[in-house]
Amino acid sequence: FFQAEDGIRDTSVTGVQTCALPIFNLMKVILLENVRKIGSIGEIIDVKRGFARNYLISQKKALFASKENIKEVEKIKQDLNKKDQEKKKEAKNIQEQIQNKTYEVKKLSTENKELYGSVKPTEISKLLKEIEKVEINPSNIQPTKEIKSLGDFDVDITLHSEVQTKIKIKVIPQEEIK
């Protein structure tokens, strides 16, 4: 057992060095739109670098929090709020159009009612585009449980950071091709 005076390194029975100080892998960003469970427009938040680069910045939901960007966001904050309200209004219209509706999907299945494959969010997105003429990003479609058999399934859809809805997917057997 060895412990350094500063208490940082500890080589115990295993002989593995551990560090008592956490590694800070955070990045400050300014939000350009309301992001559910993260923050609202103009807010400066600390998030992990990967989340910032791969999601927030790439989806244009945030900017790196430099002095220039902070000043820029302050100037355009009202426009961003206006755009966000328009997106919210559009999301509410879609919500009214699809909320609590049941959509049928025909799939090939085995005798014990299991599907060959499953019903994925991309398929649900295409179905909604065909039937309701609304475009919903598959990443915003979340089945409550995986759709791998015949029957009724609940699906949660996030249309906006403040607007969510539910639909039902009814999976019915596709007629056998003879």
Image: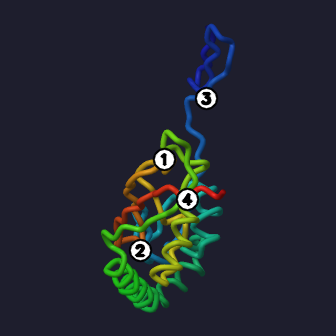
Q: Which residue is mark 3?
A: 19
Marks 1 and 4, the one that precedes in the sequence:
1
Marks 2 and 4, the one that precedes in the sequence:
2
Q: Helix or strand or loop: what does disc 4 sit on?
A: loop
Crowd rating for badge 1 (residues with CA inside 10 Å; few <14, some 14–19, many 20+): many
Q: Which residue is mark 1?
A: 149
Marks 3 and 1, the one that precedes in the sequence:
3
Residue 1 against residue 44 in the figure, above or below: above
Disc number lying in front (2 or 1) = 1
Residue 82, picture quadrant:
bottom left
**Separation of residues labelled 3 and 1 (CA atoms):** 48 Å
Disc number lying in front (3 or 4) = 4
Q: Give residue 175's mark.
A: 4
x, y percentage for residue 37? 39, 61
Residue 161 against residue 19 in the figure, above or below: below
**Separation of residues labelled 3 and 4 (CA atoms):** 61 Å
Q: Are marks 3 and 4 in contact (CB under 8 Å)?
A: no
